[in-house]
Image (cartoon, rainbow, N blue to C red):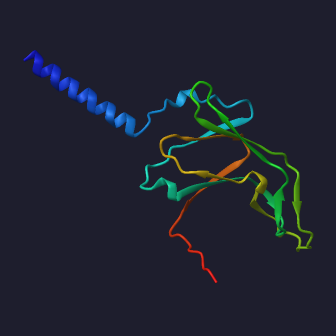
Amino acid sequence: MKKIICAISLFFSFSASVFTVEYLDIPLEIYPKAEQGMKKILYLLEKKEKEEDYKLEIKFGKDIVVDDNIHQFLGGNLEERDVEGWGYPYYIFSGNSEMVHTLMAFPAGSKKERRVYYPGATKMLSYNSKIPLVLYVPKDVKVEVSLWNRMQEIKEVSR
């Protein structure tokens, strides 16, 4: 009876380790805490078939009151770092409030709250559901993550 119980428990422990290899179970506590004035944003990506066909686009912006001109922030930097001792990446965004815009006259009262982006910090990343996407951004910055999918390959036309 003891041999059967040992064999069953050995089987379940082996099958559990097989599933752990299939999806890395990363403790989220290994990522640093957000510094003063920053917030940590964490995305857990769902597993997809053929993940190499997917990309993530990350955009950063602020919601501010502006007129109908085209506005964008100057600068903006997205720095990639690794969790010390683990090697998993995380990203730190920094940007100032200097803005450029087109110079067209709009009627008074046309100002609305809009999202103004930091185009210099927009980043495309490979899709990887085995690790979380961890971002550190200032508290007033909004993050947009878009999922891009390669639907088909475009073939070269030779002439």
List x then y, in percent, for residue 26: 48, 32
Question: Considering depth in this image, is 22 or 45 the residue closer to the camera?
Answer: 22
List x then y, in percent, for residue 116: 77, 58
Q: Is residue 55 left or right of residue 99?
A: left
* In the depicted structure, whether residue 78 falls above or below residue 16: below
Report the residue at 67% width, 35% height from top: 81
| Among the 4 quarters of the image, the one containing residue 111 | bottom right
Residue furthest bottom in the image: 159
Q: Is residue 13 left or right of residue 87?
A: left
Point out the image quarter for the C terminus: bottom right
Residue furthest front in the image: 159
Point out the image quarter for the N terminus: top left
Report the residue at 49% width, 29% height from top: 27
* In the depicted structure, whether residue 85 falls above or below residue 42: above
Report the residue at 74% width, 30% height from top: 36
List x then y, in percent, for residue 126: 57, 51
Count of marks, rendered view: 0
* In the depicted structure, whether residue 154 falls above or below residue 13: below
Report the residue at 41% width, 55% height from top: 49
Q: Is residue 142 left or right of residue 120?
A: left
Question: Considering depth in this image, is 46 or 158 the residue closer to the camera?
Answer: 158
List x then y, in percent, for residue 142: 69, 50
Residue furthest top in the image: 2
